[in-house]
């Protein structure tokens, strides 16, 4: 007859408790969390609030300081388009502007962007690019002229797209913001039978001398990590999955829910 040693008793570790009885393990974990909250909550709560407030304040100051750096020495590059414009010049332009992309360690302090502006007034429309002061002089100008042969640029110090009143007065201003409604992994249609910007150019027609309209497009070269993430999301979409993180987790739980049946049909 064999006798079991006393060391073979049931282990009392949290993992063993969870494996033997999941609900008991969860209840035990909740009990420990409650005890810790009662013991350290009065001290950890204020410290956590102060730490979060400090991080938010530091982040706001860093962004404000970086915005001041972008605005210092900024300039406006007015684009004088040639009589005929090759649509492929846009791809060539952004290929030339890849030099704006900073290394990953420098992007922690911020990544410069460009602001394309369509400025409408009684005299017509002007196409101009707001360039931050951290971008070297002549970089954007040469990129534009190389992308569209025959195009010319004129550079002036940056100013607001809307006029500033010399004395206080009433001025009516309406503004809005547009963003992509669908994930960036989904393609944007680039082939059009007619110029898609034709409606934009014709919408603000008939402006008086006291009226202005401006459309700003903020853009910057995309990083390699973001391109890789978008390509992975596009592959998931082509495979029948979801481009969102939550949708991907649901796909893991129900891997065959979104796929069509492969068996024979009537």
Image: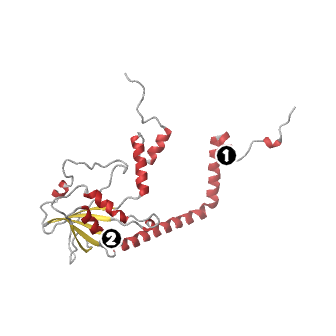
Q: Quadrant of residue 212?
A: bottom left
Figure check: 56 above or below 22: below
At mark 2, the secondary structure is loop
Question: Which residue position is annotated with label 2?
Answer: 132
Q: Tell me the number on the disc at residue 256.
A: none
Give residue 132's position: percent from left, percent from top: 33, 70
- Taking 177 as reference, is 72 above or below it? below
Residue at 34 percent across and 65 percent down: it is: 113
Q: Which residue is mark 1?
A: 15
Left or right: 240, with 172 as reference point: right
Q: Quadrant of residue 211?
A: bottom left
**As drawn, is 41 to the left or to the right of 127?**
right
SS class, disc 1:
helix
Q: Nearer the viewer, residue 115 or 95?
A: 95
Residue at 21% across / 55% down in the picture? 197
User: Residue 26 location in percent, x, y?
Assistant: 62, 45
Q: Is residue 108 left or right of residue 129?
A: right
Which is closer to the viewer, label 1 or label 2?
A: 2
- Mark 1 or mark 2: whose residue is earlier in sequence: 1
């Amino acid at each position: 007859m064999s006798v079991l040693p006393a060391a073979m008793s049931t282990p009392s570790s949290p993992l063993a408790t969870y494996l033997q009885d999941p609900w008991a393990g969860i209840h035990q974990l909740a009990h420990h969390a409650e005890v810790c909250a009662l013991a350290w909550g009065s001290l950890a709560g204020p410290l956590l609030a102060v730490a979060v407030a400090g991080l938010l304040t530091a982040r706001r100051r860093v962004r404000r300081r970086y915005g001041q750096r972008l605005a210092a020495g900024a300039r406006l590059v007015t684009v004088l388009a040639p009589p005929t414009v090759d649509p492929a010049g846009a791809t060539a332009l952004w290929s030339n502007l890849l030099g704006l992309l900073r290394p990953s360690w420098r992007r922690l302090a911020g990544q410069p962007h460009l602001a394309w502006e369509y400025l409408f007034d009684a005299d017509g429309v002007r196409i101009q690019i707001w360039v931050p002061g951290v971008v070297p002089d002549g970089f954007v100008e040469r990129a534009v002229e190389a992308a569209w042969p025959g195009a010319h640029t004129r550079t002036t110090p940056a100013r607001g797209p809307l006029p500033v009143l010399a004395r206080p007065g009433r001025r009516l201003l309406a503004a809005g913001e547009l963003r992509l409604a669908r994930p960036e992994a989904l393609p944007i249609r680039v082939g059009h039978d007619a110029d898609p910007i034709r409606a934009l150019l014709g919408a603000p027609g008939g402006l008086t001398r006291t009226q202005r309209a401006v459309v700003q497009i903020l853009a910057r070269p995309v990083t390699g990590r973001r391109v890789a993430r978008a390509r992975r999301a596009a592959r998931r979409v082509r495979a029948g999955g979801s481009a969102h993180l939550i949708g991907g987790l649901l796909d893991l739980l129900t891997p065959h829910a979104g796929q069509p049946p492969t068996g024979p049909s009537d």
